[in-house]
């Protein structure tokens, strides 16, 4: 079965420090992967998505970046964190549901990383 | 107008109540509708998936889609304290490469 891992689970970082969050997927190959940020009252904000190794699309300009060094690994980074980067970061992989005309792509989420920037 | 609107709540009900959670949307191309449940400090988990209009039932949960009104609902029968969570609707047009659009979520609290 497919599993998605994220670490660390919780992180407290000072403003201006670097960031590296990791997401790995097991049990599937060549998945489409996504990074979201969830802030209180603001819902899920899509940050990046990747359809393959080295292929990254950015949805929102910011001081974050993403990389996909391996097929089942997706990394979210920052060189200098801002207070506004605090939030709950979620990695998701795309999963095909249903058959025929009722088939659609949905997403399964990892456990998330809660980041607090002080 | 935002693509997907969802009342954030909070919604508080007693145990055993019937709960109705709703989303409205503006894009008539949406054909695939999902409900996610998110417990505090956890990632969202897929609860229900529906294609086009109609109802789908799974245990105490019923998902309903009315495409003519651009309105979807999730009903929870005999609600339990373990149903206390944030419920997010999500939808897409379904073509390859189209994004999944999420509502902001409704927070539900079921008291015993």
Image (spheres, coloured by chain):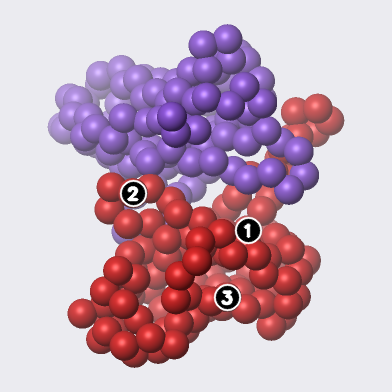
Chain B colour is purple
Mark before the other along the chain sequence, 1 or 3: 3
Mark before the other along the chain sequence, 2 or 3: 2
Q: Which label belongs to residue A3?
A: none
Residues at badges 1 and 3 in contact (C-beta under 8 Å)? no
Q: Is residue B96 left or right of residue B7?
A: right
Report how far apart the C-alphas of labels 1 and 3 lie in the structure.
15 Å
Q: Is residue B6 left or right of residue B98?
A: left
Q: Which residue is mark 3?
A: A66
Tell us which disc is closer to us: 1 or 2. 2
Which quadrant would the C terminus of chain A be assigned to in this image?
Answer: bottom left
> Which chain has been coloured red in this picture?
A
Q: Dot 3 falls on which chain?
A: A
Q: In the image, is residue A76 above or below residue B1?
A: below
Q: Which residue is mark 2?
A: A42
Name the secondary structure under disc 1: strand
Packing grade of label 3 (10 A; few <14, some 14-19, many >=20) is many
The residue drawn where x is 36% and y is 63% is A88
Q: In the image, is residue B7 above or below residue A13?
A: above
The residue drawn where x is 47% and y is 75% is A64
Q: Which residue is mark 1?
A: A93
Mark before the other along the chain sequence, 1 or 2: 2
Q: Position of residue A85 (x, y in %)?
A: 34, 71
Q: Dot 1 falls on which chain?
A: A
Q: Dot 2 falls on which chain?
A: A
Q: Nearer the viewer, residue B87 or B96?
A: B96
User: Quarter of the image holding residue B33?
Assistant: top right
Q: Are marks 2 and 3 on the same chain?
A: yes
């Amino acid at each position: 079965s497919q599993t998605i891992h994220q670490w660390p689970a919780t992180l407290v970082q000072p403003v201006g420090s670097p960031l590296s969050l990791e997401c790995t997927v097991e049990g599937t190959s060549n998945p489409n992967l996504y990074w979201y940020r969830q802030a209180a009252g603001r819902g899920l904000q899509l940050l990046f998505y990747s359809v393959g190794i080295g292929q990254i699309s950015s949805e929102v300009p910011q001081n974050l970046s993403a990389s996909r060094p391996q097929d089942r690994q997706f990394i979210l980074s920052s060189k200098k964190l801002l207070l506004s980067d605090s939030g709950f970061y979620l990695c998701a992989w795309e999963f095909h549901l249903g058959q025929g005309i009722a088939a659609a792509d949905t997403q399964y989420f990892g456990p998330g990383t809660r980041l607090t920037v002080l | 107008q935002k693509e997907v609107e969802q009342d954030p709540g909070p919604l508080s009900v007693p145990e055993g109540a019937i709960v109705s959670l709703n989303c409205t949307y503006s894009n008539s191309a949406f054909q695939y509708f999902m409900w996610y449940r998110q417990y505090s400090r956890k990632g969202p988990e897929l609860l229900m998936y529906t294609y086009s209009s109609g109802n789908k039932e799974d245990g105490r949960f019923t998902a309903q889609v009315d495409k003519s009104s651009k309105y979807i609902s999730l009903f929870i029968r005999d609600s339990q304290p373990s149903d206390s969570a944030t419920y997010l609707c999500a939808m897409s047009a379904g073509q390859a490469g189209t994004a999944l659009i999420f509502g902001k979520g409704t927070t539900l609290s079921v008291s015993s």
